[in-house]
Image (spheres, helix red, strand yellow):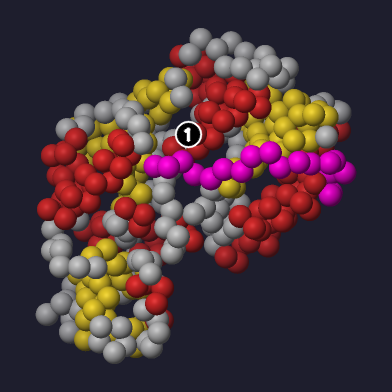
Amino acid sequence: MSYEIYLKKNEEKRIVAGHSWVYANEVTRIENKDKNGSLATVYSNDGRFIGKGYINHASKILVRIFIRNGEEDGKELYLNRIKAADDYRKKLGYDNCYRMVFAEADDLPALIVDRYGKVLVIQCLSLGIDQRKALITECLVELFHPKGIYERSDVAVRKKEGLEEKKGLLYGEVDDYTQIEENGIKMLVDVKNGQKTGYFLDQKENRYAVRRYCRGAEEVLDCFCNSGGFSLNAATVAKHVTACDISPLALKNVEDNASLNSLKNISTLCGDVFEVLRNFRQERRQFDVVILDPPAFCKSADQVKDAYRGYRDINATAMKIVKSGGFLITCSCSHYMTMPLFEKMLIEAARQSGRIVRSVEVKTQAPDHPSLLCAEETQYLKFFVLHIK
């Protein structure tokens, strides 16, 4: 018989509001028994039906609910959910490169599907989803007829599910680099070895937004540039862009993407961004625009204190090397660094820098990465444009 999960008193409120996660410490008892990864039914303490989801005894998240009515788990459910998720993106005008399925926000917890042209990339972040990988692949082929489907489940969070990191070809063929078009710019995406699923799709609209602030700029500095998304957008309107990253491979990607778009006003700089910014400060070198888009400094709640200090120091240093009247464009992709906390950090950084700073524009992740109001974990990206006097 399938698992029946009964919650402690009042623990159902967050879940009834739409959150998917049932933590093991919220459960008062488990009845019946089935295989790990199977479908479990969750009830409130007084026996009211809450929903169904896949169970994993190895995880602190015991159940991830995705069925709240009479739907049956199986191929038809996945076909309907994936199509509905893609239809939403198509309605917003996405067609070439976008996040097709965003896990909890699309009622498919722990499943990520990204589109890069004719190639799809998936991440399976829970035991239940991982066990249904073949079924999901079958649905994607039936719905979209892609050239290839590649798995990028090589992420540390899988260890919390008792799963090994994994990546590889699931269907068709996938070249080493897949060409996409974003904001009118051609980009080569390394879906096999690039960060995340190959590219940071959540910054698409924000990358286009930097053009307003880089227009006519003599010098733009793009820090943590990765494959050059911000650099290339800036280079369409600025006179010169310096793309900085610690990874030689990332800088090679920037150079290839610049060449692909016939942009000759981008130069690359390899180095640790913290050290590079300090050196520019000592040299009294300044820029019209500085862009900071670092990787997540904190990936768990106990790292917030150290991450806060790192964000503050790097933003304060960046503020010091922006010309008077220029802009600092700064981001954080860690949901543990909440919007209020990030803004508090920027206030302290401004005070530390000795500059007068105005907040000009605040944005978040792209609309193909919608967030659930009931699940703060799905709201993670912060994007601030600051005017430095």
Q: Could you classify mark 1 by the number of other residues whose Cα lies within 10 Å: few (under 14), some (14-19), or many (20 or more)?
A: some
**In the rendered image, which quarter is residue 92 located in?**
top left
Span shown in magenta: 351-368
- Please say whether residue 249 is visible from this viewpoint: no
**In the rendered image, which quarter is residue 168 located in?**
top left
Percent across and percent down for residue 226 are 54, 33
Q: Out of 54 and 173, give the one closest to the viewer.
A: 54
Q: Amino acid at mark 1?
A: Lys
In the picture, the quarter occupied by the N terminus is bottom left
Q: In this image, 158 relative to 343: left or right?
A: left
Q: Residue at 65% of width from left, 20% of height from top?
A: 215
Percent across and percent down for residue 192 are 36, 35
Q: Residue at 84% of width from left, 41% of height from top?
A: 356
**Secondary element at tag 1:** helix
Q: Is residue 206 above or below residue 269?
A: below
Give the residue at mark 1. 204
Q: Residue at 40% of width from left, 81% of height from top?
A: 11
Q: Is residue 49 above or below residue 293?
A: below
Percent across and percent down for residue 375 are 44, 63
In the picture, the quarter occupied by the C terminus is top right
- Please say whether residue 39 is visible from this viewpoint: yes
Percent across and percent down for residue 169 are 25, 38
Q: In this image, 89 relative to 336: left or right?
A: left
Q: How many marks?
A: 1
The stretch drawn in magenta includes residue 353: yes
Q: Out of 274 and 321, give the one closest to the viewer.
A: 321
